[in-house]
Amino acid sequence: MIVGMTSEIDEPAWLSLAFAERGVRRFGPGESNPRIVEYNAHTNLVGYDDKISWCSSFLNWCLANTGQRGTGSALARSWLEWGRAIEVPVYGCVVVSRDDPASWKGHVGFYLRHDAESIYLFGGNQLGDVRELDYPLASVLGYRWPGSI
């Protein structure tokens, strides 16, 4: 059973904007995608090219351009302190996941749905693109929503 996506769910403005960016991708060696540089300008990566991890930059850009405050950080795990924690994922919420539980590294994207083994996120720097991609459900560290508790 797939959970999280029904036709009656309101689409958050930041997710609609994210969908409009589908296909933005990292350029090859010696070039840099100016759109990703623009995403990075919403974090502590101002002036960086598209060769660094930019998943958090993309979320910060989406939220800023829809009137929400992001973390301002390029670290995916910075989102664990943002907004309010929610126990059950909601369409469009921020999902923070990990590569390795002991590492500072992670990934962040917008929740679309999940099944018994995978969570499907829409975000930036997913195989170098703005796109949908699945991750192991067991890698999730938290779900966040704008606002305070």
Image (cartoon, grey):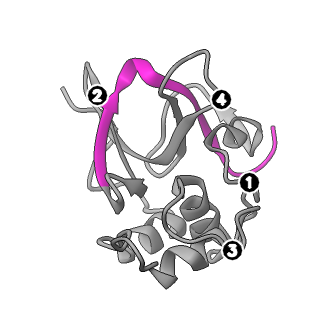
- What separation in Å lies between label 2 and label 4 (alpha carbons)? 22 Å
Q: Residue at x 56, y 71 (%)?
A: 49
Please give the residue where the numbered disc 1 appears in the rendered image. 73
Work out which quarter of the rendered image holds the N terminus and state it.
top left
**What residue type is disc 3 on?**
Ala
Label 3 and label 2: CA atoms lie apart by 31 Å
Prevailing secondary structure class for the magenta stretch in the rendered image: strand
The amino acid marked with disc number 4 is: Trp
Q: Is residue 131 above or below residue 36?
A: above
Q: What mark, if any, has residue 104 been given in the picture?
A: 4
Query: 5 or 57, which lies in front?
Result: 57
Of the image marks 2 and 1, the number of the one nearer the N terminus: 1
What's drawn in magenta, residue-wise?
132-149
* Disc number lying in front (2 or 4): 4
- Residue 147 falls inside the magenta stretch: yes
The residue that disc 2 covers is 118
Q: Quadrant of residue 86?
A: top right
